[in-house]
Image (cartoon, helix red, strand yellow):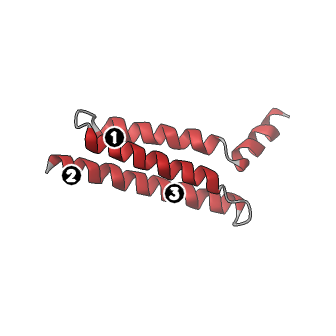
Amino acid sequence: MKKALSTIIVSAFVVLVTASFSFAEYTATGASNFPYFQLGCLIVGGLIIISLKHKYQRMYVGEVVGAFALYTILIALFTAPVIDALKAFVS
């Protein structure tokens, strides 16, 4: 039961973070410049992290959630709005 509960918690976090990423990118760029590749990478990474948590029970839920949060930040850094903001900040 503990294995299923921890996997469900991690899955819910992955879905919520992916949905918030999608909403934020849609509001920032609109439908014409939506970063589908980054969204796909985020979904695949989330599935891999969920499967690792399900397979290896010695991983804590907090570790997995933190790893996915950092992965989401890394993916978000390589989207067009963030790169444009960095270009404007530097110049």
Q: Name the residue under label 1.
A: 52
Q: Name the residue under label 2.
A: 4
Mark 1: secondary structure? helix
Name the mark on residue 43. Answer: none
Where does the image place residue 37, in percent across and percent down from the top left? 63, 52
Name which residue lies at 49% across and 52% down: 43
Q: Name the residue under label 3.
A: 20
Query: In which image quadrant can residue 8 be found?
Result: bottom left
**Mark 1 crowdedness (10 Å alpha carbons): few <14, some 14-19, many ≥20:** some
Three-letter code for the amino acid on which mark 3 is drawn: Ser
Left or right of 45? Residue 80 is right
Residue extending farthest to the left is: 1
User: What distance separates the C-alpha of mark 2 from that of mark 3?
Assistant: 24 Å
Q: Describe the element under mark 3 as helix, strand or loop.
A: helix
The quarter holding residue 62 reads top left
In three-dimensional space, the C-alpha distance between marks 2 and 1, rounded to whole angstroms, equals 13 Å
Which one is earlier in the sequence, the residue at label 2 or at label 3? 2
**The image quarter in which residue 55 lies:** top left
Report whether 35 appears left or right of 88.
left
Residues under numbered marks 2 and 3 in contact, where contact means CB atoms less than 8 Å apart:
no
Q: Residue flagged by tag 2: what amino acid is it?
A: Ala
For the C terminus, the image quarter is: top right
Of the numbered discs 2 and 1, the one sitting upstream in the chain is: 2
Q: Residue at x 42, y 57 (%)?
A: 15
